[in-house]
Image (cartoon, helix red, strand yellow):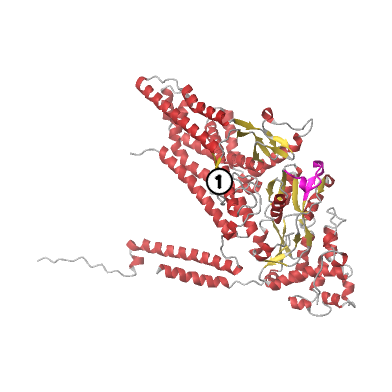
C-alpha cells in the first residue's frame, strides 16, 4: 500500500508578500514605484495649482505671437515680426551649428593631441600633458569668457581699418578682415545661380533650400562614390596580382573634375568683405561670440578626448605594434592600419558622452551673447513673455532631442566598429 | 486601483498647496529685513560704494520703505538682479519689492502679474555713441553694431525703431551693464542703447566722458518705478505710499533738514497728516504713526535723493526735466494725503 502524499496545496497569504522571498522583491518594487509616482504626481499637481493661483496656467499660445526682438546670427531668414516659434527655431539651428563645429574641431584636436602625448619626443609629449591638464582643470565658462575678452580687447575695431594710413589692414591678400566684432571671410557667390526652393510657405517653420548647394553636394557624392569604385577595383587587382595600380589621379579627377565643371557652369566667384559705413559688408561674418564659444568648447573638450584617445591606444597590446613593425610597416601606417582601428572600440563609447557634454555646454553661449536656443527660447522669449515653466520645459525637450539624436548616431557607428563577437 | 490612489493623492496635494497665501508685511517684520531687488550695479541708481554699502536713487527707495516698515533704513538686504532674473526673483518671493529701473508696461503689469506702485523716474531710451563717429542723429546709424542689454524693453523698442525707420543694424546682446561698457569702449559695438538715465550714468563712469555723446532721439517712453507682486494689496499700498511720501514731501517743502522742526506742528494739515501728528494714516497702512518721518529721514525727500545721487551736481548730471514736480512743469503728481 502506498500512501500517495499529495504535494501540499499552495495557499496564498498576504504575509507572503513580505516574508516569501519569491514575492518580496516584487512587493518592494511595486511599493517603490507607487511612492515614486505619488511624489511626481504631487510635484506636478502642486505646480499646476500654484500656477493657476498665480493666474498663469500652462499655455503655449505665446508661440504664435510676434517675437519683437532681433537675432544677429540666423541661418534662416528672420525678422523681429516673426513668431516666437521661429525665434526658437533659429536658436536651435545656432545650437546645432555650434555643436557640429565644436564636435568636429574637438575630435581633430583631441585625436592629434592624444597621439602626440604618446610621442617619444620629450618636449612634445610634455607640452601636450600641460595642454590637457590646463584645459581639463579650468571651468569651460572661464575659457569662453577669456577668449571673448581677448578677441574684444586684442583685435582692432573696424574703424581702425579706415583712413589713408590705417592702423589695421586685412589679412591674406586683403580677403579676410579680422576685427573685434568677428572675422569676415570671403563668401561663395554664383553669378548663374539656380535659385532656391521654398518650403512650407509663410509658416513659422519655413525654410529655403539652395539648389546650387544641392547640385554641388550631389556632384561631390557622385565623385566620392566613383572614387570608391576605383579603390575597390584597385583592391581587387592588388589581391589578385600583388601589385597596386596607381589610382590617385583617377580619384582626384573623379572628385574634383565634375565639381570644377559645375562650379564654372554656376559662375562661382568669391565675395570679399569691404568696409562700408560702420562695418564690413559682404563676405561671411563669423561673430566674436561664435568664435569664442567654438574655440573654448573645442579646446576644452579636446583635452578630454585626448585622454580617451590615449587610453584607447594604450589599451592595444604592445605586441600588435611590434608585429606590425616586424611586417615592415612604417610607424604612421602602423598607427593608421593596426592601432587606431582596434583602439576605436575603446574610444567610441566615452566619445559619445563627450559629444553630448559639448552640446550641452554650448548653452553657456549666453555668457558671450551667442543666440543659441537658450538665448532665444530660454532667454529673451522667456523674459518677454514671462512663461518660465513652458519655456524651460521646451528647452529641456530640445536638448533631450538633440542629445538622443547624437547618441543614436554615435551608437550606430559604435555598433559598426565594435569587436564582432562570434 | 493604482490609478485611483494616484488621482486621490493629486487632489489632496492640490488642496494642500492652495493654502499658501502671502502677507508680505508680516514676513518682512518677522524677518526684520526688507529684501529689495536692485540692479547689479549702475552708478547713481544702485551700486555698492568703496565700503561695500549700497548707494543710489533706487536704493534710496528701498531704504525709505525699510525705514517706514521697520524703522531702520539699513535693515535692507539688497539682492542684485539682472534684466533677466529680476521678475523671477520677485515672482518667487525671493525679494519683497523690486526697485531696479524697471519700465512699467501693460504686459508686465497684467500678464506677468506685478503691481507697479508708481513712477520714480520718467525716462526714455536713447543712444550713446563715440564723438569720433561724427553721428548726430539715430537715423544715421544704418549698418551700425548696437550693444543692448538683453531681457529688457530696450531690446523690443530698438527692433521697432529700426524697423519703422527702415534701417539695418547688428544687435549684440549683453547680460550686464559692465559687459556692455567693456564692449562699447573696446569698439566692439558702435552704439550702446538703454534708458537715457542709464546712458548718463554709464558715461559718467568713463575715463573721458566728453568723448561720447547721447543722441537727441529718445525713442520710447520708459516710466521706471518700483514694483511688487500682484495680490498682496496691503503691501503694495505700503510701497506705493512710501514712494508718494517722498514725492509729496518735496511738494510740501518737507526736507530731512527741517522735518524735526515741522514735527512740532505746522499750520498745514496735509504736512501734519503726512508726519503723523494729525490723523491716523500710519495706522491705516498697518504701520507706526511716524512711518513717513522715518522714510524721509532715511535719505531725504525726492528732491534730496535726486540731487545727491543723479542730479546736476553729481558726475551723472541729470536735469530734473520730466521728473520735476507738477508745480514746476514736470510729471510728478501724487494723490493727496487725506
Q: Where is the N terminus of chain B found, in terms of image quarters?
A: bottom left
Q: Nearer the viewer, residue A244 or A9?
A: A244
Q: Is residue A12 left or right of residue A194?
A: left
Q: Is residue B133 one of those drawn in magenta? A: yes
Point 70% across, 34% down: residue: A274
> What span is in magenta?
B127-142
Which residue is depicted at the point 89% across and 67% down?
A: B257
| Residue A1 x, y percent position in the rendering | 9, 66
Query: Of residues B266 and A225, which is closer to you in this image?
Result: A225
Please state the horizontal and vertical placement of residue A396, each as a whole percent of the image.
Answer: 54, 54
Residue B248: in magenta span:
no
Quarter occupied by residue B133: top right
* Image-based side of B209 in relation to A24, left or right: right
User: Quadrant location of residue B25?
Assistant: bottom right
Please give the residue where the numbered disc 1 appears in the rendered image.
Answer: A207
- Is residue B96 in sight in this rendering? no
Callout 1: SS: strand
Q: Residue at x 43, y 38 (%)?
A: A345
Amino acid at each position: 500500500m502506498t500512501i500517495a502524499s499529495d504535494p501540499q496545496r499552495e495557499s496564498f497569504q498576504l504575509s507572503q508578500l513580505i516574508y516569501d522571498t519569491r514575492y518580496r522583491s516584487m512587493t518592494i518594487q511595486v511599493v517603490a514605484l507607487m511612492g515614486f509616482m505619488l511624489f511626481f504626481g504631487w510635484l506636478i499637481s502642486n505646480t499646476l495649482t500654484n500656477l493657476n493661483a498665480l493666474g498663469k496656467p500652462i499655455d503655449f499660445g505665446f508661440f504664435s505671437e510676434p517675437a519683437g526682438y532681433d537675432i544677429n546670427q540666423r541661418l534662416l531668414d528672420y525678422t523681429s515680426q516673426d513668431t516666437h516659434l521661429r525665434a526658437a527655431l533659429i536658436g536651435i539651428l545656432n545650437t546645432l551649428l555650434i555643436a557640429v563645429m565644436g564636435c568636429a574641431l574637438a575630435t581633430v584636436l583631441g585625436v592629434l593631441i592624444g597621439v602626440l602625448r604618446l610621442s617619444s619626443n620629450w618636449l612634445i609629449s610634455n607640452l601636450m600633458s600641460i595642454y590637457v591638464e590646463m584645459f581639463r582643470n579650468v571651468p569651460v565658462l572661464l575659457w569662453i569668457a577669456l577668449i571673448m575678452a581677448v578677441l574684444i580687447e586684442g583685435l582692432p575695431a573696424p574703424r581702425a581699418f579706415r583712413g589713408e594710413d590705417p592702423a589695421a589692414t586685412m589679412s591674406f591678400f586683403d580677403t579676410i578682415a579680422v576685427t573685434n566684432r568677428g572675422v569676415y571671410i570671403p563668401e561663395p557667390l554664383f553669378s548663374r545661380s539656380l535659385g532656391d526652393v521654398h518650403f512650407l510657405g509663410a509658416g513659422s517653420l519655413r525654410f529655403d533650400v539652395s539648389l546650387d548647394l544641392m547640385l554641388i553636394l550631389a556632384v561631390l557624392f557622385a565623385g566620392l562614390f566613383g572614387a570608391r569604385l576605383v579603390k575597390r577595383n584597385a583592391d581587387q587587382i592588388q589581391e589578385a596580382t600583388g601589385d597596386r595600380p596607381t589610382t590617385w589621379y583617377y580619384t582626384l579627377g573623379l572628385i574634383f573634375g565634375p565639381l570644377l565643371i559645375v562650379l564654372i557652369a554656376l559662375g562661382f566667384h568669391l565675395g570679399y568683405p569691404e568696409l562700408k559705413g560702420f562695418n564690413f559688408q559682404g563676405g561671411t561674418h563669423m561673430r566674436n561670440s561664435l568664435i569664442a564659444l567654438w574655440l573654448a568648447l573645442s579646446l576644452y573638450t579636446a583635452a578630454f578626448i585626448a585622454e580617451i584617445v590615449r587610453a584607447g591606444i594604450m589599451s592595444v597590446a604592445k605586441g600588435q605594434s611590434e608585429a606590425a613593425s616586424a611586417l615592415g610597416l612604417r610607424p604612421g601606417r602602423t598607427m593608421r592600419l593596426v592601432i587606431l582601428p582596434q583602439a576605436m572600440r575603446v574610444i567610441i563609447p566615452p566619445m559619445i558622452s563627450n559629444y553630448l557634454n559639448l552640446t550641452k555646454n554650448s548653452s553657456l553661449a549666453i555668457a558671450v551673447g551667442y543666440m543659441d536656443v537658450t538665448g532665444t527660447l530660454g532667454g529673451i522669449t522667456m523674459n518677454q513673455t514671462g512663461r518660465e515653466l513652458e519655456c524651460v520645459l521646451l528647452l529641456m525637450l530640445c536638448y533631450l532631442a538633440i542629445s538622443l539624436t547624437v547618441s543614436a548616431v554615435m551608437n550606430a557607428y559604435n555598433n559598426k566598429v565594435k569587436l564582432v563577437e562570434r | 486601483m493604482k490609478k485611483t490612489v494616484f488621482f486621490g493623492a493629486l487632489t489632496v496635494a492640490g488642496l494642500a498647496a492652495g493654502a499658501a497665501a502671502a502677507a508680505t508685511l508680516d514676513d518682512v517684520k518677522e524677518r526684520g529685513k526688507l529684501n529689495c531687488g536692485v540692479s547689479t550695479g549702475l552708478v547713481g541708481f544702485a551700486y555698492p560704494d568703496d565700503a561695500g554699502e549700497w548707494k543710489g536713487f533706487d536704493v534710496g527707495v528701498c531704504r525709505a520703505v525699510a525705514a517706514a516698515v521697520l524703522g531702520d533704513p539699513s535693515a535692507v538686504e539688497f539682492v542684485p538682479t539682472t534684466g533677466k532674473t529680476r521678475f523671477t526673483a520677485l515672482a518667487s518671493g525671493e525679494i519683497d519689492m523690486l526697485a531696479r529701473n524697471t519700465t512699467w508696461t501693460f504686459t508686465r503689469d497684467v500678464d506677468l502679474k506685478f503691481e507697479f506702485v508708481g513712477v520714480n523716474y520718467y525716462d526714455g531710451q536713447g543712444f550713446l555713441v563715440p564723438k569720433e563717429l561724427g553721428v548726430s542723429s539715430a537715423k544715421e546709424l544704418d549698418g551700425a553694431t548696437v550693444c543692448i542689454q538683453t531681457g529688457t524693453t530696450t531690446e523690443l523698442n530698438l527692433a521697432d525703431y529700426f524697423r519703422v525707420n527702415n534701417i539695418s543694424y547688428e544687435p549684440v546682446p549683453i547680460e550686464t551693464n559692465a559687459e556692455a561698457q567693456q564692449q562699447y569702449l573696446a569698439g566692439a559695438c558702435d552704439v550702446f542703447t538703454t534708458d537715457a538715465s542709464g546712458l548718463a550714468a554709464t558715461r559718467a563712469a568713463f575715463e573721458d566722458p566728453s568723448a561720447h555723446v547721447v543722441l537727441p532721439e529718445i525713442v520710447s517712453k520708459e516710466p521706471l518705478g518700483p514694483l511688487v507682486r500682484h495680490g498682496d494689496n496691503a503691501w503694495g499700498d505700503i510701497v506705493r505710499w512710501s514712494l508718494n511720501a517722498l514725492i509729496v514731501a518735496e511738494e510740501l517743502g518737507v526736507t530731512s533738514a527741517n522735518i524735526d522742526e515741522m514735527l512740532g506742528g505746522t499750520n498745514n494739515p496735509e504736512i501734519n497728516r503726512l508726519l503723523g501728528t494729525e490723523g491716523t494714516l500710519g495706522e491705516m497702512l498697518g504701520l507706526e504713526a511716524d512711518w513717513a518721518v522715518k522714510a524721509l529721514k532715511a535719505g531725504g525727500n525726492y528732491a534730496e535723493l535726486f540731487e545727491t545721487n543723479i542730479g546736476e551736481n553729481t558726475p551723472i548730471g541729470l536735469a530734473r526735466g520730466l521728473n520735476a514736480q507738477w508745480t514746476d512743469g514736470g510729471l510728478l503728481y501724487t494723490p493727496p494725503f487725506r
